[in-house]
Protein backbone atom coordinates (compact mmCIF):
# COMPACT_ATOMS: atom_id res chain seq x y z
CA UNK A 1 0.00 0.00 0.00
CA UNK A 2 1.45 3.36 -1.00
CA UNK A 3 1.85 5.91 1.77
CA UNK A 4 0.44 9.30 0.73
CA UNK A 5 1.09 12.36 2.85
CA UNK A 6 -2.06 14.03 4.10
CA UNK A 7 -3.28 17.05 2.15
CA UNK A 8 -2.73 20.40 3.80
CA UNK A 9 -5.63 22.84 3.72
CA UNK A 10 -5.79 26.39 4.92
CA UNK A 11 -8.05 26.28 7.96
CA UNK A 12 -10.45 23.58 9.07
CA UNK A 13 -13.38 22.28 7.03
CA UNK A 14 -15.82 24.44 9.02
CA UNK A 15 -13.65 27.54 8.59
CA UNK A 16 -13.44 27.07 4.83
CA UNK A 17 -17.22 26.58 4.63
CA UNK A 18 -17.76 29.75 6.65
CA UNK A 19 -15.42 31.69 4.38
CA UNK A 20 -17.05 30.39 1.19
CA UNK A 21 -20.63 31.13 2.27
CA UNK A 22 -19.86 34.29 4.26
CA UNK A 23 -21.26 32.83 7.47
CA UNK A 24 -18.88 34.99 9.45
CA UNK A 25 -20.08 38.31 7.93
CA UNK A 26 -22.13 40.37 10.44
CA UNK A 27 -25.77 40.88 9.42
CA UNK A 28 -25.30 44.65 9.10
CA UNK A 29 -22.76 44.13 6.32
CA UNK A 30 -25.11 42.06 4.21
CA UNK A 31 -26.95 43.52 1.26
CA UNK A 32 -30.68 43.66 2.11
CA UNK A 33 -33.09 42.35 -0.54
CA UNK A 34 -34.76 45.17 -2.44
CA UNK A 35 -38.56 45.13 -2.81
CA UNK A 36 -39.88 44.52 -6.32
CA UNK A 37 -40.89 47.71 -8.11
CA UNK A 38 -44.63 48.48 -8.21
CA UNK A 39 -46.06 48.35 -11.71
CA UNK A 40 -47.61 51.64 -12.86
CA UNK A 41 -51.41 51.47 -12.65
CA UNK A 42 -51.83 53.54 -15.76
CA UNK A 43 -49.87 51.08 -17.86
CA UNK A 44 -51.70 47.93 -16.67
CA UNK A 45 -55.14 49.11 -15.47
CA UNK A 46 -56.65 45.58 -15.25
CA UNK A 47 -54.02 44.05 -12.86
CA UNK A 48 -54.92 43.64 -9.17
CA UNK A 49 -52.66 45.38 -6.67
CA UNK A 50 -49.40 43.47 -5.96
CA UNK A 51 -49.02 41.90 -2.49
CA UNK A 52 -46.28 43.36 -0.31
CA UNK A 53 -42.87 41.68 -0.69
CA UNK A 54 -41.77 39.67 2.40
CA UNK A 55 -38.11 40.35 3.19
CA UNK A 56 -36.35 37.40 4.89
CA UNK A 57 -34.56 38.21 8.15
CA UNK A 58 -30.77 38.46 7.90
CA UNK A 59 -28.81 35.18 8.27
CA UNK A 60 -27.12 34.86 11.64
CA UNK A 61 -23.42 33.88 11.65
CA UNK A 62 -22.61 30.26 12.46
CA UNK A 63 -20.80 29.76 15.76
CA UNK A 64 -17.91 27.25 15.51
CA UNK A 65 -16.90 25.66 18.83
CA UNK A 66 -13.22 26.23 19.45
CA UNK A 67 -13.01 23.13 21.65
CA UNK A 68 -13.79 20.72 18.79
CA UNK A 69 -10.78 20.63 16.45
CA UNK A 70 -11.25 18.96 13.09
CA UNK A 71 -9.86 15.44 12.74
CA UNK A 72 -6.57 15.25 10.87
CA UNK A 73 -5.03 12.26 9.14
CA UNK A 74 -2.27 10.59 11.17
CA UNK A 75 1.21 11.48 10.05
CA UNK A 76 2.84 8.94 7.69
CA UNK A 77 5.27 7.79 10.41
CA UNK A 78 2.35 6.86 12.65
CA UNK A 79 0.50 5.00 9.91
CA UNK A 80 3.58 2.99 9.03
CA UNK A 81 4.50 1.91 12.50
CA UNK A 82 5.42 3.34 15.86
CA UNK A 83 4.72 6.96 16.75
CA UNK A 84 7.70 9.14 17.55
CA UNK A 85 8.56 9.28 21.24
CA UNK A 86 6.32 11.77 23.01
CA UNK A 87 4.10 12.29 19.95
CA UNK A 88 0.36 12.34 20.45
CA UNK A 89 -1.60 9.77 18.46
CA UNK A 90 -4.72 11.32 16.90
CA UNK A 91 -8.07 9.74 17.67
CA UNK A 92 -9.78 7.74 14.96
CA UNK A 93 -12.80 9.34 13.24
CA UNK A 94 -15.09 6.79 14.89
CA UNK A 95 -14.23 8.19 18.31
CA UNK A 96 -12.39 5.03 19.37
CA UNK A 97 -9.34 5.47 21.52
CA UNK A 98 -5.95 5.14 19.84
CA UNK A 99 -2.72 4.53 21.71
CA UNK A 100 0.99 4.21 20.98
CA UNK A 101 2.75 1.03 22.10
CA UNK A 102 6.23 1.68 23.45
CA UNK A 103 8.69 -0.63 21.61
CA UNK A 104 11.09 -0.39 24.56
CA UNK A 105 8.40 -1.82 26.82
CA UNK A 106 7.92 -4.76 24.46
CA UNK A 107 11.66 -5.37 24.36
CA UNK A 108 11.97 -5.23 28.15
CA UNK A 109 9.21 -7.84 28.44
CA UNK A 110 11.07 -10.15 26.06
CA UNK A 111 8.35 -9.77 23.43
CA UNK A 112 8.45 -9.20 19.69
CA UNK A 113 9.06 -5.67 18.46
CA UNK A 114 7.48 -4.84 15.08
CA UNK A 115 10.13 -3.81 12.61
CA UNK A 116 12.90 -5.18 14.80
CA UNK A 117 15.56 -7.70 13.81
CA UNK A 118 14.49 -11.27 13.09
CA UNK A 119 15.26 -13.32 16.17
CA UNK A 120 14.76 -16.92 17.18
CA UNK A 121 11.53 -15.90 18.95
CA UNK A 122 10.25 -14.14 15.82
CA UNK A 123 10.92 -17.22 13.70
CA UNK A 124 9.28 -19.54 16.20
CA UNK A 125 6.08 -17.47 16.21
CA UNK A 126 6.18 -17.39 12.42
CA UNK A 127 5.98 -21.16 12.53
CA UNK A 128 3.22 -21.12 15.16
CA UNK A 129 1.01 -18.59 13.36
CA UNK A 130 1.43 -20.36 10.01
CA UNK A 131 0.02 -23.56 11.48
CA UNK A 132 -2.88 -21.66 13.08
CA UNK A 133 -3.69 -19.89 9.81
CA UNK A 134 -3.68 -23.18 7.93
CA UNK A 135 -6.03 -24.72 10.49
CA UNK A 136 -8.29 -21.64 10.26
CA UNK A 137 -8.65 -22.20 6.51
CA UNK A 138 -9.61 -25.82 7.11
CA UNK A 139 -12.16 -24.89 9.79
CA UNK A 140 -13.61 -22.12 7.59
CA UNK A 141 -15.42 -24.70 5.49
CA UNK A 142 -17.78 -25.47 8.37
CA UNK A 143 -17.97 -22.08 10.11
CA UNK A 144 -16.14 -19.14 8.52
CA UNK A 145 -16.65 -16.74 11.42
CA UNK A 146 -15.68 -19.18 14.15
CA UNK A 147 -12.57 -20.16 12.18
CA UNK A 148 -11.18 -16.65 12.74
CA UNK A 149 -11.25 -16.97 16.54
CA UNK A 150 -8.21 -18.35 18.38
CA UNK A 151 -8.20 -19.06 22.12
CA UNK A 152 -4.80 -18.91 23.83
CA UNK A 153 -4.91 -20.85 27.09
CA UNK A 154 -2.82 -22.84 29.57
CA UNK A 155 -3.53 -25.47 32.19
CA UNK A 156 -2.28 -23.49 35.20
CA UNK A 157 -1.22 -19.88 35.90
CA UNK A 158 2.32 -18.65 35.12
CA UNK A 159 2.83 -20.93 32.15
CA UNK A 160 3.23 -18.10 29.60
CA UNK A 161 -0.18 -17.83 27.93
CA UNK A 162 -0.36 -14.00 27.99
CA UNK A 163 3.25 -13.76 26.75
CA UNK A 164 2.37 -16.10 23.89
CA UNK A 165 -0.94 -14.34 23.13
CA UNK A 166 0.75 -10.93 22.75
CA UNK A 167 3.57 -12.31 20.61
CA UNK A 168 1.12 -14.23 18.44
CA UNK A 169 -0.94 -11.07 17.92
CA UNK A 170 2.12 -8.98 17.03
CA UNK A 171 3.41 -11.66 14.66
CA UNK A 172 0.02 -12.12 12.97
CA UNK A 173 -0.41 -8.36 12.53
CA UNK A 174 2.51 -8.48 10.07
CA UNK A 175 0.38 -10.58 7.68
CA UNK A 176 -0.78 -8.69 4.59
CA UNK A 177 -4.43 -9.73 4.44
CA UNK A 178 -5.65 -9.71 8.05
CA UNK A 179 -6.37 -7.40 10.97
CA UNK A 180 -5.81 -8.66 14.50
CA UNK A 181 -8.00 -7.99 17.54
CA UNK A 182 -6.39 -9.12 20.81
CA UNK A 183 -9.05 -9.60 23.50
CA UNK A 184 -8.05 -9.59 27.16
CA UNK A 185 -10.43 -12.38 28.15
CA UNK A 186 -8.68 -13.32 31.41
CA UNK A 187 -11.59 -11.58 33.09
CA UNK A 188 -10.55 -12.11 36.72
CA UNK A 189 -6.89 -11.12 36.27
CA UNK A 190 -6.52 -9.14 33.01
CA UNK A 191 -2.91 -8.43 32.15
CA UNK A 192 -2.63 -7.73 28.40
CA UNK A 193 -3.10 -3.96 28.51
CA UNK A 194 -0.81 -3.58 31.52
CA UNK A 195 2.04 -5.39 29.72
CA UNK A 196 1.57 -3.11 26.73
CA UNK A 197 1.48 0.04 28.85
CA UNK A 198 -2.12 0.86 27.92
CA UNK A 199 -4.68 2.25 30.37
CA UNK A 200 -7.74 0.11 31.06
CA UNK A 201 -11.20 1.15 29.91
CA UNK A 202 -14.67 -0.23 29.12
CA UNK A 203 -14.46 -3.68 27.60
CA UNK A 204 -16.00 -7.06 26.97
CA UNK A 205 -17.71 -7.48 30.35
CA UNK A 206 -19.32 -4.04 30.09
CA UNK A 207 -20.85 -5.00 26.75
CA UNK A 208 -22.05 -8.38 28.00
CA UNK A 209 -23.69 -6.77 31.04
CA UNK A 210 -25.44 -4.17 28.88
CA UNK A 211 -23.59 -1.19 30.37
CA UNK A 212 -22.12 -0.44 26.92
CA UNK A 213 -24.23 -0.88 23.80
CA UNK A 214 -21.58 -1.56 21.14
CA UNK A 215 -18.45 -3.66 21.51
CA UNK A 216 -16.82 -1.75 18.65
CA UNK A 217 -16.85 1.39 20.82
CA UNK A 218 -14.63 -0.38 23.37
CA UNK A 219 -11.93 -1.42 20.91
CA UNK A 220 -8.61 0.43 21.21
CA UNK A 221 -6.62 1.05 18.04
CA UNK A 222 -2.83 0.96 18.30
CA UNK A 223 -0.01 2.41 16.23
CA UNK A 224 1.11 -1.12 15.39
CA UNK A 225 -0.40 -1.57 11.93
CA UNK A 226 -3.41 -3.94 11.85
CA UNK A 227 -3.43 -4.55 15.63
CA UNK A 228 -6.19 -3.45 18.02
CA UNK A 229 -7.11 -4.35 21.60
CA UNK A 230 -10.31 -5.10 23.52
CA UNK A 231 -10.05 -4.69 27.32
CA UNK A 232 -11.65 -7.12 29.75
CA UNK A 233 -13.88 -4.42 31.24
CA UNK A 234 -15.39 -3.99 34.68
CA UNK A 235 -14.86 -7.05 36.87
CA UNK A 236 -17.86 -9.03 38.06
CA UNK A 237 -18.47 -12.26 39.98
CA UNK A 238 -20.78 -13.45 37.20
CA UNK A 239 -18.22 -13.52 34.38
CA UNK A 240 -18.81 -17.18 33.48
CA UNK A 241 -22.59 -16.70 33.38
CA UNK A 242 -22.21 -13.62 31.15
CA UNK A 243 -19.97 -15.53 28.74
CA UNK A 244 -22.51 -18.37 28.58
CA UNK A 245 -25.42 -16.05 27.72
CA UNK A 246 -27.10 -15.63 24.34
CA UNK A 247 -25.93 -12.03 24.30
CA UNK A 248 -22.32 -13.23 24.55
CA UNK A 249 -22.79 -15.40 21.50
CA UNK A 250 -24.14 -12.44 19.51
CA UNK A 251 -21.40 -10.08 20.73
CA UNK A 252 -18.51 -12.48 20.10
CA UNK A 253 -19.84 -13.54 16.70
CA UNK A 254 -20.21 -9.85 15.90
CA UNK A 255 -16.47 -9.30 16.37
CA UNK A 256 -15.72 -11.30 13.23
CA UNK A 257 -18.90 -10.35 11.37
CA UNK A 258 -18.01 -6.64 11.65
CA UNK A 259 -14.77 -7.11 9.70
CA UNK A 260 -14.18 -10.04 7.30
CA UNK A 261 -10.39 -9.47 7.58
CA UNK A 262 -10.38 -9.64 11.39
CA UNK A 263 -8.82 -12.51 13.36
CA UNK A 264 -9.75 -12.47 17.05
CA UNK A 265 -7.22 -13.77 19.60
CA UNK A 266 -8.54 -14.36 23.13
CA UNK A 267 -6.13 -14.40 26.06
CA UNK A 268 -8.04 -16.83 28.28
CA UNK A 269 -7.74 -17.61 31.99
CA UNK A 270 -6.02 -20.93 32.82
CA UNK A 271 -8.32 -23.86 32.12
CA UNK A 272 -7.81 -25.58 35.49
CA UNK A 273 -7.95 -22.36 37.53
CA UNK A 274 -11.05 -20.56 36.20
CA UNK A 275 -14.27 -21.74 34.56
CA UNK A 276 -14.53 -19.07 31.80
CA UNK A 277 -11.87 -20.89 29.76
CA UNK A 278 -14.18 -23.82 29.03
CA UNK A 279 -16.98 -21.43 28.00
CA UNK A 280 -14.69 -19.44 25.73
CA UNK A 281 -13.60 -22.66 24.04
CA UNK A 282 -17.19 -23.07 22.80
CA UNK A 283 -16.81 -19.84 20.79
CA UNK A 284 -13.33 -20.45 19.33
CA UNK A 285 -12.45 -22.24 16.13
CA UNK A 286 -9.19 -23.48 17.62
CA UNK A 287 -7.26 -23.46 20.89
CA UNK A 288 -3.54 -22.83 21.28
CA UNK A 289 -2.71 -24.55 24.58
CA UNK A 290 0.57 -23.29 26.07
CA UNK A 291 2.60 -25.99 27.80
CA UNK A 292 5.53 -24.86 29.93
CA UNK A 293 8.38 -27.33 29.61
CA UNK A 294 9.61 -27.01 33.20
CA UNK A 295 6.22 -26.80 34.92
CA UNK A 296 3.17 -28.32 33.16
CA UNK A 297 2.58 -31.93 34.23
CA UNK A 298 1.15 -34.60 31.98
CA UNK A 299 -1.91 -34.97 34.20
CA UNK A 300 -2.59 -31.20 34.06
CA UNK A 301 -2.25 -31.27 30.31
CA UNK A 302 -4.70 -34.14 29.91
CA UNK A 303 -7.20 -32.54 32.28
CA UNK A 304 -6.95 -29.15 30.57
CA UNK A 305 -7.50 -30.74 27.17
CA UNK A 306 -10.63 -32.41 28.47
CA UNK A 307 -11.90 -29.10 29.90
CA UNK A 308 -11.47 -27.40 26.52
CA UNK A 309 -13.14 -30.11 24.45
CA UNK A 310 -15.86 -27.66 23.40
CA UNK A 311 -13.39 -26.78 20.64
CA UNK A 312 -12.45 -29.56 18.24
CA UNK A 313 -9.06 -28.17 17.25
CA UNK A 314 -6.54 -27.98 20.10
CA UNK A 315 -2.87 -27.42 19.32
CA UNK A 316 0.00 -27.44 21.82
CA UNK A 317 2.82 -24.89 22.03
CA UNK A 318 5.83 -25.83 24.13
CA UNK A 319 7.08 -22.80 26.04
CA UNK A 320 10.27 -22.11 27.98
CA UNK A 321 12.41 -24.75 26.32
CA UNK A 322 16.09 -24.73 27.29
CA UNK A 323 18.57 -24.06 24.49
CA UNK A 324 20.64 -27.08 23.53
CA UNK A 325 24.00 -26.52 21.75
CA UNK A 326 24.01 -28.04 18.31
CA UNK A 327 20.22 -28.11 18.08
CA UNK A 328 17.99 -26.16 15.71
CA UNK A 329 18.12 -22.44 16.44
CA UNK A 330 15.84 -20.10 14.51
CA UNK A 331 17.06 -16.59 13.79
CA UNK A 332 20.79 -17.35 13.47
CA UNK A 333 20.41 -17.73 9.69
CA UNK A 334 19.44 -14.05 9.35
CA UNK A 335 22.34 -12.99 11.57
CA UNK A 336 24.79 -14.84 9.32
CA UNK A 337 23.20 -13.39 6.18
CA UNK A 338 24.27 -9.89 7.19
CA UNK A 339 27.94 -10.84 7.56
Image (spheres, grey):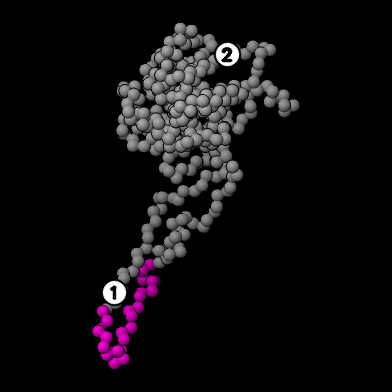
Return the residue at label 1: 54
> Predominant secondary structure in magenta?
loop
Residue 58 falls within the magenta-colored stretch: no
The relative height of residue 92 versus residue 181 in the rendered view (above or below) is below
Disc 2 packing (10 Å; few <14; some 14–19; many ≥20): few
Is 13 above or below relative to 190?
below
Q: Residue lying at the far front in this picture: please name it.
A: 141
Q: Is residue 269 above or below residue 28?
A: above
**Going 62% across and 21% down the picture, which residue do you hit?**
120
Q: Which residue is mark 2?
A: 321
In terms of secondary structure, where does tag 1 sit? loop
Q: In whole angstroms, how far apart are the C-alphas of marks 2 and 1?
A: 88 Å
Q: Residue at x 53, y 17 (%)?
A: 317
Place residue 172 in its image quadrant: top right
| x and y percentages locating residue 154 in the rendered image | 46, 16
Magenta range: 26-51
Amino acid sequence: MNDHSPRRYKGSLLERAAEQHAFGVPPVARTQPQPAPQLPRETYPDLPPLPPVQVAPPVQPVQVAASEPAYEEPAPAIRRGFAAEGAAVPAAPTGRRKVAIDPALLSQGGMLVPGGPITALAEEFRQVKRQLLLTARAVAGADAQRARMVLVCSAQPNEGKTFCAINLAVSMSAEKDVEILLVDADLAKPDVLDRLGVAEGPGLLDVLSGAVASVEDCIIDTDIPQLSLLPAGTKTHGDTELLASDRARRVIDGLTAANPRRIVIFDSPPALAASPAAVLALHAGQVMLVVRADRTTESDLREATAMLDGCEHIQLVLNSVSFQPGGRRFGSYYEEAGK
